[in-house]
Image: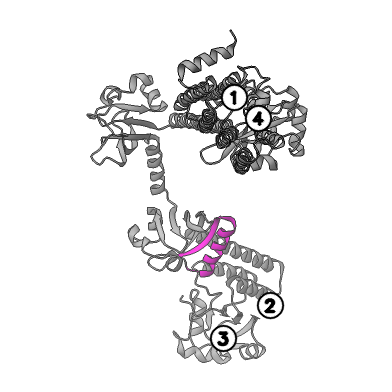
Amino acid sequence: MPAWWTWFTVGDIAVPKLMAQESLALIILIASLLVFRTFRERYLLVWIVGWMAYFGSRWTLRGGGDHVPSYLIAISHAEFILAVCLFAAAVLVYTHARKLLLPLLLTSTAVISYAVLRALWWPDSLTLRVALEVSYRIITLAAAVQLLRFRWARWEIGPWLLGLSLLFLHLDWAPVNVYLPPGLAPTADLIFSLSILLIVFDESKGRTRRLCAINTLMTSIAGAQQHAPMMVTALDQLKRLMRSNAAWTYLLEGDDLVMAQQIGLSQEFLQDHDSSTMDETLATVLRGGKPTVIKASTASESMRAFLESERFHHVVIVPVQGKKSSIGTLMFGRRHSICYTLEEMEFLSTCAQQLGFAVENVRLLEQILRAQRQWTNTFDSIQDFVLLHDSEFRVVKANHALLQRLGRAPADVVGNLCEAVLPRTREAWTACPYCKKDDEGFHEGVDPCFGGFSMVSTSSFTDQGSKQKGAIHVVRDTTDGRVAEEKYRLLFEQVQEGVFVATHDGKLLDCNDAFVRMLGHSNREELMALNIDTELYVSVEQRDAFRREVELHNYVRNFEVTLRRKDGVLLTAMESSFATRDASGRIERYQGFLLDMTEKKRAEDEIRRRNRELNALNAMAVIATQSFDLDEILNLTLRQVISLLGAETGSIYLCENEEPTFRRRAGWGQRSADRARLSEVKLPDGFGDLVTRSRTEVITPDYLPHLFGCFCGAKISPWELWESAATRRASTPAMMKTCWSQLDDSCPLLSKRFVYMKRPAAPMKS
């Protein structure tokens, strides 16, 4: 039986008083409503409204036969044109070509108006009828072309059936309908209705596949420890779903894009484009944050080169978004043209975003694991003992140093009570040996567990979600430090050199007992209250020279300084010190040693003086033995004595037997007038013998004012009378006696003599 008879029979049974085609349209309308109830597609709603108009156009002419009124024909034609336009609008909504809806509305209004006017005023005009047929077929043809372009290169039968069925929609035209098979119109309507259902089902199938891909991606993300396997799974799923020839992803590292994973690319491409510099096209896509289709014909030169090398027609670039910005790109290459739907682009954006979050999470996890390993390594590399316990004194964590000292594995320590883990010495303790009454701070003393001395740093912590506190103990063995500290303390206290620490402005910070004794003070507090720059150091110039030397070399060695003791006595010391500077390089303090050199310097001066005296005696002895001229002997001897004693002038007076008159036989340094006036000196009776027979004396006008006229005629003040020479040194008279004994041996006829000298210094006490 022909198929069209089946549809007529179904129509007569299903809908009374309706023809088979009207009944079929009604059934399709009801089925479309049921499908819309499930899928809720907007274009399907427009499609249903179109089927209502199509059903109305058929129902309006039911039972009219060959004598249908013109107004019913006009209404039927208007409803048919409206149905065709609604079908075209559904196609435009489906293909996301909504910008064409307004032109379609205007065109539909014009065609509907034309159909109504033609049916009312020119029903028999063949030309106008052909124009009407052409006008609405142009609308269906445009919709079919838009549909096929939208679903091009996809293995789907629904769009092709719908496009062809749109072209077979027509109005009933008696001259034409006569030559058509009776069941062709219902069959075309059935195929037309099934085509849209196929599209709906294909869309639902595509969504299901995309949801499965997202589910697979999320599953791989959830179990991923590294981003490489996760990316391979994602690229494989998306490549098959998008019907691409290749898929690859780049990740941003600085300003460059580095390929992370790929599927379907050639080895030559991988060698040349393993990393890519950010060009303007990629930068624009990353800034936009939306998927972009770039064709080889419109791409930049750098991108066109690699597209042509892989024979890609276009590439889809999807920015991989992180939590704050783009972290890379997801790319799909295809060698043939295809139109991507908005849902597919949104799907790619969603997948790329999830992939970006996953990459960042994996990186964050890697950073956390790396930080945990670093923390563990750092924790175990601490040489001090580190112990963490909770509020119940159960060990939470112990570092490697403590475990090694205990000789236990971590499993034998963690979770056990401190009393069961830590050893005990003679000191009794409970709970934790390092917990004191004041929970936090530093404590130093005898170690209660390992003996010796230790310094314990205690800090408290609170477990997350709990108010109970635990404790962190860092135990440092200070036994060796204590021994070294005691050793250096004893060295500091018992060393005989003065050790000091002073600030740059002269404040004494610390010193040892030798420093206190050296300066004649009774205790450190008394000495540390002084300013050493102004109260201990005598010479300001000497202190300035010290500062310049330290500023230049940062230290001084054996620097001679003069200090003032508490009793006012000056002492000479050798200072060896260095400077300590702050972070900015300025001198903060001086530290060093002082060695008292006063006695040593006095002994050295005495040795030098004795050497000079011996040299002078040797010279005088040589002169006395080699010369027979008394005047020469006396003059050379006088010069040696004056040079030795540092006098300005000097004279030697001799007398014969008991004569009271002394005549000058040798002189040095006197002026001509003084030399003439003091060529002879007559001493009072008895005084000459007193002078010549006495020991060496220093005589000033204060002691013998009655002799002032004898020697002060030359206005010499003070004046000194010597038997041989005058000096404050106790050894000088002995030396001069030796000198004059040599002179007496060379001149035995001399019975009396004395020496007169003027010294440049103030009068000296004998």
* Element type where label 2 sits in the image: helix
Tell me the distance, in whole angstroms, between the alpha carbons under discs 2 and 4: 152 Å
Point out the tag, 3 or 1, that comes first from the N-terminus: 1
Amino acid type at mark 3: Glu
Check whether the beta carbons of the residues at disc 1 and disc 2 lie within 8 A of each other: no
Distance CA(mark 3)–CA(mark 4): 166 Å
Circle 2 is placed at which residue position? 631
**Label 3, label 2: how far apart the Cα atoms are:** 20 Å
Which mark is first along the chain, 1 or 4?
Answer: 4
Q: Residue furthest top?
A: 1
Q: Are marks 4 and 1 in contact (CB under 8 Å)?
A: no
Q: CA distance from mark 4 to mark 1?
A: 29 Å
Left or right? Give the position of 126 relative to 595: right
- Element at badge 3? loop
- The mark that comes first in sequence, 2 or 4, is 4
Question: Where is residue 303 drawn, in percent x and y?
Answer: 73, 35
State the residue at coordinates (74%, 26%): 269
Q: Nearer the viewer, mark 2 or mark 4?
A: 4
**Mark positioned earlier in the residue sequence (3 or 4):** 4
Residue closest to the eye, 295 or 587: 295
Disc 1 element? helix
Q: Which residues are magenta?
A: 538-563
Q: Position of residue 530 (x, y in %)?
A: 38, 65
In the picture as drawn, the residue positioned furthest to the front comes out as 67
Residue 302 drawn at (x, y percent):
75, 37
Q: Which residue is mark 1?
A: 238
- For badge 1, the amino acid type reads Leu
Q: For residue 153, say whether it is visible.
A: no
Residue at the spot of label 3: 659
